[in-house]
Amino acid sequence: MGNFWYTSEIEKTNTTKNKKNSKTKLVNNEKEKKMKEKQEENKRKNRNRKRKAKKKRKKNVPEWRKRRFPSYPEHNNESQVKNSNSGSSKATKDSSQELKRKRINTNKNNKNQEKKAPKRRVAVIFGYLGTGYHGLQIQYGGQNVIETIELELVNAFAKIGAISEENKVDIKKVGWSRAGRTDKGVHAARQCVVFKMAMIDTEKKIVELVNSVLPKDIRVWGIQRVTRTFNAQRRCDYRKYQFLLPTFLLTEKSIPSIEEEETTIEEKRLRFENFTDEALKFYNEKVLSKFIGTNNYHNYTKGKTYNNPKSMRYITKMVANKPITLNEKQWILIEITGQSFMIHQIRKMITMSIGVMRGCITLEQFEDSFTESKYLIPIIPGFGLLLDRAVYETYNNLKITQERGTIHFNHMNQEIENFKINHIFSHIAEVEKNENQFYDWLKTLYKRAIIKVEIN
């Protein structure tokens, strides 16, 4: 009896196990079936997607593909003849050869058969004389065409086929960016713009073609491939500007003749009668050195307040070099290096430095201009200002750029310097000799001097 009970218990446990196993098998089988069904559905969906995509491609065939692979209605007729008269193999061979000849002839005669030039993102380094232009940035002024440097540049690239006629109207389509904007009449030796260019030829050949179309006061120095996300403004580490200034603005006592009725300000005391080495040392150490570092330049631009964070700017260098002689006048070249500059900032900085040297404003007031105090500062003419170069040190040190090439064009430094001296500097000296723009500007400095404004 004991054995029978034991065996029955074992049988019961075995049956329960078998039931459980069968249930799990059923569940697993169902899961596998569902998985297979899902896979099949996914395959069907993918097939349908591919078919739809093919249909769309057939409907919306691009023009270049139509030109490259032209369809021949004769081919369909001849294939039907081939199928109907399968016995005549010689006729089919002749027809196929004729078809090949037709295809070759049509491809030769088809002028639009040529491939489109590949597009690459490139940096274009160029220089220009800003006189006669309304600044660098292109301006779409409706019916009136506003002469700018970028307008000349875009038109030139469009003429040689590096920019399409459609993109010429809106340069945002080619991802256009610039290292920095220059005002009306301001020059540049090494300006940089970046955009997606159609590579119609080698970089060297494109430079030659563009320069043959451009006016003589705009020269392209070189073209360099860059990364897809490269932006000329954001990637720029710092910018170097230069200002060519006549020394008589800083030292000579001769002031333009102002009528007695207009004389409202007393004749100020000059710190130095002549621009000697002592005057140059004072100008660098006591005046220009105050601009170096991080300061608030809300008084040196327009539309900015003291509390605006954008009013803060960092300048690493501001120094005046030894005098040079141009057109029988003494000039000094002031070098200004900084991360970025606001509109009219450099020109107002030069005005302030002249005001200090001519005794129009004290050193204490000069330092006070960086505080919350409000000062009205006249703007010196911009034809003496030029952008010397935009520097991309961080980008040039990347591994990718080491392979593709860095943005510097050091091999063309001599040619650029010659353009700067023979075209820009000589032009500035010639304009001052013929028009006396700096000399006449002194009238405005004495009529509308640097004044502190009371804030209510």
Image: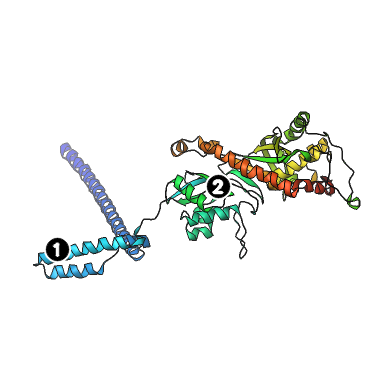
Tag of residue 290: none
Which tag is nearer the camera, tag 1 or tag 2? 2
Residue 376 visible in image: no
| SS type, badge 2 | strand
Looking at the picture, which amino acid does disc 1 mark?
Lys
Q: In which quarter of the image is the N terminus?
A: top left
Report the side of 413 relative to 349 (left or right).
Answer: left
Please state which of residues 421 and 228 is positioned toward the viewer in this rendering: 421
Query: Where on the picture, by quarter, is residue 47?
Result: bottom left
Of all residues, the one furthest to the right in this rendering is 260
Please state which of residues 260 and 403 is positioned toward the viewer in this rendering: 260
Of all residues, the one furthest to the left in this rendering is 87
| SS type, badge 1 | helix
Report the side of 220 relative to 67 (left or right).
Answer: right
Please state which of residues 269 and 403 is positioned toward the viewer in this rendering: 269
Q: Name the residue under label 1.
A: 93
Decide: is 238 above or below 456: above
Q: Mark 2 points at which residue?
A: 219
Q: Which residue is drawn at 76% across and 33% down?
A: 283
Looking at the picture, which amino acid does disc 2 mark?
Arg
Residue 89 x, y percent position in the rendering: 10, 64
